[in-house]
Image (cartoon, rainbow, N blue to C red):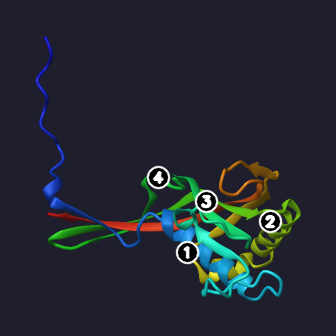
């Protein structure tokens, strides 16, 4: 005979939780896109411009990439890969405060994950050149990126092998992916009513 289900021992109505930042899945990806747009805005060969009629390269989120639109300009399409909590300390408790009516707990953890910058062109050499520029940009400006964006650290940068993308609309499109392994900080708090 099965035992009856016991009621919860935790009264969730006395607890409120607040994360002062969202889990940075899109934030990190957006920051990578912003950095690359700023970086290529200064590039004399592949000058990025927000005006699509003037830009010499597109730097965009994978959600905005439409493979059915044929455009001779190269592009960098950014996508987020997996992320995970790092759990650096026991319960990630960073501090606490108590009053007569409440208990406040503050938490801090790192989230590690990766972002892929797909360097696309009809020419494999051009895809390699773009990938090399992205690769070097994240190495050279690592500290600046840490100071300006939500990225706590760039753990590694690697260039993948050239791939030929098969499509009826854009035949022979080449991709050289650049993979960034990044870490960002997330904090949150919980308030307990006494």
Does residue 16 appear left or right of residue 70 in this picture?
left
Place residue 57 in its image quadrant.
bottom right
Place residue 53 in its image quadrant.
bottom right
Circle nearer the N terminus (3, 4): 3
Circle nearer the N terminus (2, 3): 3
Circle 3 — which element? loop
Q: What residue is pinned by disc 3?
A: 67
Circle nearer the N terminus (1, 4): 4
Q: What residue is pinned by disc 1?
A: 150
Total labels drawn? 4
- Dividing the image into 4 quarters, which one contains the N terminus? top left
Circle 1 — which element? loop
Please tell me whether mark 4 or mark 2 is closer to you in this view: 2
Spatial CA span between label 1 and label 3: 29 Å
Residue 103: horizontal and vertical position, in percent? 24, 67
Residue 184 vs 113, above or below: the answer is: below
Q: What residue is pinned by disc 4?
A: 90
Residue 54: horizontal and vertical position, in percent? 68, 88
Tell me whether the residue at label 1 lies in contact with that at label 3, contact meaning CB atoms closer than 8 angstroms.
no
Spatial CA span between label 2 and label 3: 19 Å
Tell me whether the residue at label 1 lies in contact with that at label 4, contact meaning CB atoms closer than 8 angstroms.
no
Please tell me whether mark 1 or mark 4 is closer to you in this view: 1
Outermost residue on the front side: it is: 168
Circle 2 — which element? helix
Please tell me whether mark 3 or mark 4 is closer to you in this view: 3
Q: What residue is pinned by disc 2?
A: 131
Spatial CA span between label 4 and label 2: 40 Å
Q: Residue at x 78, y 50 (%)?
A: 163
Residue 157 or residue 133, whichever sits in front:
133
- Dividing the image into 4 quarters, which one contains the C terminus? bottom left
Label 4: few (<14), some or many (≥20) within 10 Å? Answer: few
Tell me whether the residue at label 4 lies in contact with that at label 2, contact meaning CB atoms closer than 8 angstroms.
no
């Amino acid at each position: 005979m099965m035992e009856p289900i016991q009621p919860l021992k935790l009264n969730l109505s006395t607890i409120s939780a607040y994360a002062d930042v969202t889990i940075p899945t899109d934030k990190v990806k957006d920051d990578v896109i912003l950095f690359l747009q700023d970086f290529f805005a200064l590039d004399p060969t592949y000058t990025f411009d927000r005006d699509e009629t003037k830009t010499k390269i597109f730097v965009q989120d994978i959600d905005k990439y439409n493979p059915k639109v044929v455009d001779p300009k190269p592009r960098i399409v950014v996508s987020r890969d997996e992320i995970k909590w790092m759990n650096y300390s026991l319960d990630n408790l960073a501090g606490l405060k108590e009053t007569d009516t409440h208990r406040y707990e503050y938490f801090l953890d790192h989230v590690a994950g990766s972002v892929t910058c797909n360097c696309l062109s009809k020419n494999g050499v051009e895809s390699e050149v773009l990938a090399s520029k992205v690769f070097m940009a994240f190495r050279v400006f690592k500290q600046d990126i840490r100071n300006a964006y939500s990225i706590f650290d760039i753990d590694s940068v690697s260039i993948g092998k050239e791939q030929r993308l098969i499509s009826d609309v854009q035949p022979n499109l080449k991709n050289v992916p650049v993979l960034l392994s990044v870490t960002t900080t997330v904090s949150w708090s919980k308030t307990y009513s006494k």
